[in-house]
Amino acid sequence: MAARLVIDAAGPNTIISNNTGCLEVFSTKYPESAWEVPWIHSLFENSSAVASGIEAALKYLGTKDKINVIAQGGDGGTADIGLQALSGMFERGHDILYVCYDNEAYMNTGVQRSGLTPFETNTTTSPAGSQSFGNIRPKKPMPEIALAHGIPYVATSSVVFPQDIQRKVKKAFSIKGPKYIQIHVPCPLGWRHDSSLTYEIAKLAVETGLYPIIEYENGVLAQRKIKPKPVEEYLKKQGRFKHLLNNPELIKKIQDIADNNILKYKLSLENQSSV
Amino acid sequence: MKEFVEGSHAVAEIVKLCKPAVISAYPITPQTHIVEDLAQMVADGELNSQFVNVESEHSAASVVLGAVATGVRAYTATSSQGLFYMAEVVFNIAGLRLPVIMTCANRAISAPINIWNDQQDSVSLRDSGWIQVYAENIQEAVDLHLIAYKLAEDKSIMLPVMVCMDGFILTHGIETVDIPGQKEVDAFLPPYKALYKLDPEKPITLGPLVDPDSYMETRYAVEQTQKKALSMIPGIAADFNKTFGRNYNGLIEEYHTKDAERVIVAMGSVCGTVKDVVDELRSKGKKVGLLKITTYRPFPCDAIYAALKNIPKVAVLDRALSLGSFSPLLTEIRAIFTSKKKKPQVISGFNIGLGGRDITTHSIKEVFRLLTNKELTSEYIDLKPELLKENYDISDSAGGLSERRKEPSCE
Ligand SMILES: Cc1ncc(C[n+]2csc(CCOP(=O)(O)OP(=O)(O)O)c2C)c(N)n1
């Protein structure tokens, strides 16, 4: 869904380089393809580098100005194994948009933790048990890592805001250089919730402050403001946090993460004018 | 034009003449001079290429993959650990049928860390689907790059080619080399026209998920193409010879093999040393020869069979090992003769020159000397028993080292 939005916004003059992950596995089984633009899959960790080669070729051919290049992957292929290639792409200044579809775990291989899995999440490789509350560290701050490269455009969005996604993709393509967009996409299977709740849950992630919707253009921050809701509302709808629910202390730790986000990104509508 | 140049520089010159649109590589000794020279050529405006400075070999291979997929010619070079770090992409490039050209400056693999020459790196990737050719000297290294582009980009091939040249010996050696002119290169190698490419005007999907229904056919197709390459290489070599005045067969070279009683089979720069020894022994009336293998993948079984079938004694030199089994080249040469009526009486295997250990004419004479009626398997040449005894408590029982010392010289 989110990928569809991104590609529609990018338009037909686009080439896509895709990391291994769920998205690709369900969208491109030979001899069919769901894509209507040129598309290449090479490996799990190198879509940024393959895209760098595509961009270099287009520059050589003199057609770069007419063609958008997108590299994309899931949270694991982006923040873990693919981070090196992505950092290289940022640092070299390629004119490419990188899109990370963040479902907060390795869903393609059966819900193992990734660097973007939230704190205390129960996954198959960070299970909750008598000695553990799940994933031991908070999400890796990918937007900030991207930003630290000094690239001109970094944004997050969520599958609940289709127009926001499309605006940001279009915005990104109006800017030359490396761009990074991270899109929050719930995975009912991995998060263990009913599919019908997808929209509500994704929205709650934003409204609690756990998934800040932010946009940095040349380092200047703009954000979607919220009237913060308690994180418990978000947590209780998902099986992956079930083990926390009778434990106010643990919920408090997650509330702290949300509160920190709200402060850091100035997300709260209260006592502030919105942008 | 004849120039007295370093091997790396000569390779950079020929790559420049092939006009790659995109070059990407990551530094590793002894490959560095090649890409440094190319970077300078781009910086000086002598070569119109996109030079992409990547953060690793994995990305270098990925960049050239992306570039060739977009329909342009590309080039990369690496060595040893760098090739291994690329390995995943190396297989991927062949599976995607992208005619990438890569130079492998052959170097030993860690641990222990060693920057000197052997061929463990490229030989370990022999099953990747890439065509692999090995240069004997700098002139051949130059010529093979041009032949490689011609072969790889042929519509009926569309496979990547790895041009292997022994690290330091060839990359840093200096020889008089005949570097072709741009006009002849252009005539021999037309601009690259991709069969399929990433192009928004005609969207296609490259590298989809392929299930058991069709995966095997894609592998079979690569194998058939490798066989096709075997039949095409001599023709391309002949064209090349006509334009550039050389004398290649492209697959193998037979050096005094016709009436030989003992023949050494080898790949790469050691062939030069073997030729010297062959010349010397021939002048003393010994019937010895060399079979040089230029194309290692696809493996030219028929040509090798024809060259060796009447040779009584064959020695195979390996500069790479398959630890826990027989050495790679030895295994393959022996395999050619299973179930064949005409065959050598003995095919002995020798491991030689690992990690940069010098291969002297003396070492080669030792191989000829040991090539008796007794078949030897994975015999080491120039091994130091005293180091083994001192450090590993391994004595003669392992390889019959001292027994061999007692044998009289056959020279
Ligand atoms: C996979 C791989 N690629 C390349 C090399 C070659 N290599 C060895 S050291 C080195 C550069 C080291 O640079 P740096 O880390 O900055 O340390 P410095 O030598 O400057 O102290 C390279 C490219 C290697 N050993 N392994």
Image: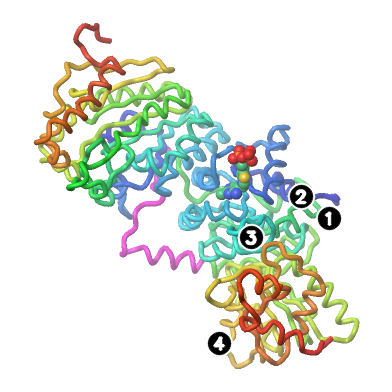
Give x and y (percent) for residue B187. Answer: 71, 50
Judge whether residue B236 is colored magenta.
no
Residue type indicated by callout 2: Ala
Q: Disc 2 designates what residue?
A: B10
Q: Nearer the viewer, residue B204 or B111?
A: B111
Residue ID for mark 3: B108
Q: Is residue B372 above or below residue B30?
A: below
Q: How is the image coloured?
A: rainbow
Q: Residue at x 65, y 88 (%)?
A: B375
Q: Chain of mark 2?
A: B
Q: Secondary structure at mark 3?
A: loop
Q: Ligand 1 near label 1 (Cβ, under 8 Å)?
A: no
Q: Which residue is mark 1?
A: B175
Relative side of B281 to B394, left or right: right
The reply to whether the C-beta atoms of the residues labelled 4 and 1 are less than 8 Å apart is no
Q: Nearer the viewer, mark 3 or mark 1?
A: 3
Residue A252 pos. (x, y %): 17, 28
Q: Amino acid at mark 3?
A: Ala
Q: Position of residue B275 (x, y in %)?
A: 81, 73
Q: What span is colored magenta in the figure?
A: B200-225
Q: Amino acid at mark 1?
A: Glu
